[in-house]
Each structure stands twice: as C-alpha cells, then as structure tokens.
Image (cartoon, helix red, strand yellow):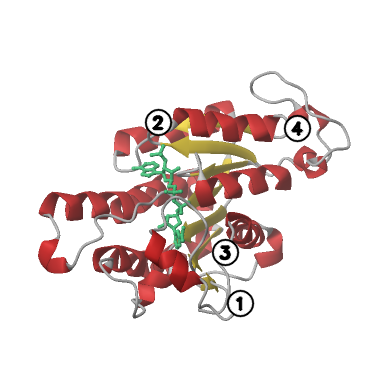
Amino acid sequence: MSKPESRVSLTGKTGHGGGLMTTAVQDKGTAIVTGASRGIGAAIAKRLASDGYGVIVNYANDARGAESVVSAITGTGGKAVAVQADVESEDDVAAMFDRAAKQMGPVTALVNNAGEAGEQARIDEQHSDALTRLMQVNVVGPMLCAKHAVRAMSTARGGQGGSIVTIASIAAKAPAGASGLVPYQATKGAMVTFARGLSNEVASEGIRSNSVSPGVIDTELVPPDLRDIANQAPLGRIGQPDEIAATVSWLVSPEASFVTGTDITVSGGR
Ligand code: NAP
C-alpha cells in the first residue's frame, strides 16, 4: 500500500523524492534493532529503513553514534528514532517497546544484535563479575527483548505477527584458533539454541525466529588477532556489516515466509 506520508521523519524532515529510499513508503511496521549505534547493528538499521520499516535505533551509551545513524536514515527519506535502553534492564526494554509502539507504530521485527566480546582471557583468568555481565548483555538481554517482542507481535495477544532475528556467531561452534573467547563462544551457542527453541514456541502465533552467525566482520568489536584469522577464510577477507544486514533483510521479509528455527552462517566460508 502506498503511503507517501511515511517519508516524513519523526524529526519533521521530509525525505528526498526518488532517492535511495523509494521503498520507505511501503510502511512495513516498526523494526527494533538493538545495539545499532555502530557496526553491524547500524548497517542493519539502515538496511531495514531502506526496506520500508520505521526503525528504532537502540543504544546503551553511544548517543552520538545512534543519532548519526538516525540522521543517515532520515536524510534519505526513511523513518528512525534513537532510543537509549540497556538490554540488561527489563525496565529499559519495556520502555523501549512502549515508545516504539506509541511513536512509530506496531512492532513487526526485532533484531537482537547488541552484544559484547567480554574479557579476552583464558577461563582460569576470567573475573566473575565480567562473566556475569557478559551473560546479562549477550544472553539475558536478547531474551528480555524477545519476551517483549512476542508480547507485541503475537497474534494470540492481538498483534500482527512478525520476525525475530538474533545475531549469534560462528564462535558458537568454538572453532580452534580464537583464544581467550570461550565465555563469548558459549553465549553465542546459547543464542543459536534460543532462536531455534523460540521458533517452536511462537510459530503458531505468526512469529518466525531465526539466528544469523557472522564470521569475522569489520567492526570495533574484533580484536587484531582475529582480523588475521579472517583472511584465512575461503573467500580470503574480512566481512562487511552490510553483508550481515542483507541476510537480516531477507530473513525478516516475506521472501523468507517459510524460514523459521534456522541459523544462517555468513562467514566467507569459515
Ligand atoms: P560493536 O561494533 O562493538 O557494536 C556493539 C553495539 O552493541 C553498539 O551499538 C553498542 O552500543 C551496543 N551495546 C552493547 N551493549 C549494549 C547493551 N547492554 N544494551 C544495548 N546496546 C548495547 O559490535 P559488532 O561487531 O557490530 O557486533 C554486533 C553483534 O554481532 C554482536 O552481538 C556480536 O557478538 C555479533 N558478532 C560480531 C562479529 C564481528 O566479527 N564483528 C562476528 C560475529 C558476531 P553502545 O556503544 O551505545 O553501548
């Protein structure tokens, strides 16, 4: 359905006609992208906005980064708003979903992207508080976001259905060669299982749940030694955030209407 008004951004700017975001008029509902102030999340937010979603650009600390992503989206006619919420906090997550629905419209997609690498150290040198924080950000946070996404999307609760994509990692398979990241690997394994299990729980309520497992992608998260490992992938290079965003774009789209409970590896062959 054509809805020209949706080119008007939440900041009141009008979009550029006939430019990059010609599909923004399609109004596909609201997509919440956690950890979208930079890196993979920023690329996903921009891509989903160009696909026609109103996008919640979530961040924890980097307000300036999130606002620059919002400006990039609204400057080309898309809809976006930056929302601060620490995914560890259920109060923050609940407030983010509430604001999304009120300010942007019904939530139809959640991309659980926010994450951190934790301490890079052998298990016998890891600190208890750092392990707890890693579990909170990488495991509990995505589960809290999924909880509120299901409440918003479930047809059994009056929602219109939707899609949840969780960004896991090839680290979930604990490949040899990456040292000091065992706890991070374990959190990503948990996310592959979570996305799969969730797909069973909510399939009959119009919600698909999948995960994407990137290989080494060119962002601030990647330690220097992992960049060297990236070049050993069959495709011989590090991946780009846009290459993950393209996969997420497909997964949330109707083109993937029969795809749920699966994990897609995007790793240059690793
Ligand atoms: P990044 O550049 O370090 O960006 C991380 C993002 O997460 C930032 O926007 C950060 O926002 C946000 N964030 C961190 N903690 C948060 C919290 N508690 N609540 C809300 N937002 C939070 O990382 P990236 O490389 O893009 O990684 C994105 C996802 O891809 C992660 O889940 C990561 O594990 C996964 N991944 C990355 C790679 C890779 O090679 N880069 C490979 C496989 C998987 P603030 O700065 O505002 O806190």
At a point 78% along the width and 41% down the height, the residue shown is 21
Circle on res. 239 = 3
In this picture, residue 197 sits left or right of residue 257: left
Q: Earlier in the sequence, mark 4 or mark 3?
A: 4
Residue 172 in view here:
yes
Image vertical order of residue 164 relative to residue 19, above or below? below
In this rendering, the label closer to the viewer, 4 or 3? 3
Q: Where is residue 143 in the image (x, y as percent from the top left)?
A: 35, 53
How many callouts does the rendering have?
A: 4
* Amino acid identity at mark 4: Gly
State the CA–CA distance, disc 4 to disc 3.
Answer: 28 Å
Residue 52 in view here:
no
Read off the residue under disc 2: 95
SS at badge 1: loop
The residue lying furthest to the top in this view is 12
* Circles 3 and 2: CB atoms closer than 8 Å: no
Q: Where is residue 218 in the image (x, y as percent from the top left)?
A: 52, 57
- Tag 4: Cα neighbours inside 10 Å, few (<14), some, or many (≥20)? many
- Mark 3 beta carbon near ligand 1 (under 8 Å): yes
Read off the residue under disc 4: 77
Read off the residue under disc 1: 235
- Tag 2: Cα neighbours inside 10 Å, few (<14), some, or many (≥20)? some
* Amino acid identity at mark 3: Gly
